[in-house]
Image (tube, rainbow, N blue to C red):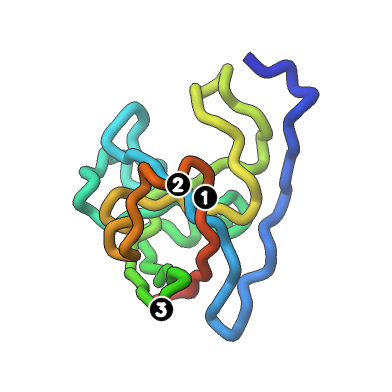
Amino acid sequence: MFDGTDCLYYDCSPPVLASGSTPARLKYRDYSYPFPSQCDGKFHPGTERVVAMSTGWFNGGSRCGKMIRVFGGDGRSVVAEVVDECDSFHGCIWEREGMPQCDNDIIEGSDAVWEGLGLNNKDYLGNVNVTWSMA
């Protein structure tokens, strides 16, 4: 468990660029368990292209159900639905939800997002640099 001394708290995310290529880091997330998605209260199988966004980009839920395009480094891109928030405001939340802290520049993608970008999420224990825009 965390005692809070190693936790960072973000009240915003980097600005969304008008050019349509906002830098982010892609992390893996399984949306089928253990918590339903915040936007629709549902679980999503790995075959669905769904993402969570850091708190600032999630913007109080205003991006729920919206589609974003995630661009990988090799020119591939995928369109995915925003279904959840990656909480970067509350720091370490292991005790509260069993979830690790989320930084302020994170897109958490399902299996289908990773596969669509030609990536194997099991090869990336940390994260992958990507960009994103509204679709």
Q: Quadrant of the N terminus?
A: top right
Q: In which quarter of the image is the C terminus?
A: bottom left
Read off the residue under disc 2. Answer: 124
Asked if residue 2 lies left or right of residue 99, the reply is right
Q: Residue at x 27, y 36 (%)?
A: 32
The residue sitting at the front extreme is 123
Q: List x then y, in percent, for residue 17.
A: 63, 77
Say which amino acid is labelled 2.
Answer: Tyr
98 lies above or below 47: above
Read off the residue under disc 3. Answer: 75
Cα separation between marks 2 and 1: 6 Å
65 lies above or below 41: below
Instruction: For mark 2, give the secondary structure.
Output: loop
Cα separation between marks 3 and 1: 17 Å
Q: List x then y, in percent, for residue 80.
A: 33, 63
Q: List x then y, in percent, for residue 118.
A: 31, 63
75 lies above or below 120: below
Asked if residue 96 lies left or right of residue 66, the reply is right
The residue sitting at the right extreme is 5
Q: Which residue is drawn at 52% across and 70% down?
A: 131
Assess disc 2: are there few (<14), some (14-19) or many (≥20) residues with their C-alpha within 10 Å of its C-alpha: few
Say which amino acid is labelled 1.
Answer: Asn
Q: Residue at x 39, y 54 (%)?
A: 51
Discs 2/1, front: 2
Q: List x then y, in percent, for residue 88.
A: 63, 43
Asked if residue 69 lies left or right of residue 91, the reply is left
Q: Quadrant of residue 34?
A: top left
Say which amino acid is labelled 3.
Answer: Gly
Q: Looking at the rendered structure, which numbered label has been put on residue 100?
A: none
Instruction: For mark 1, give the secondary structure.
Output: loop
Tell me whether circle 2 and circle 1 mark residues in contact (CB < 8 Å).
yes
Q: Looking at the rendered structure, which numbered label has been put on residue 127?
A: 1
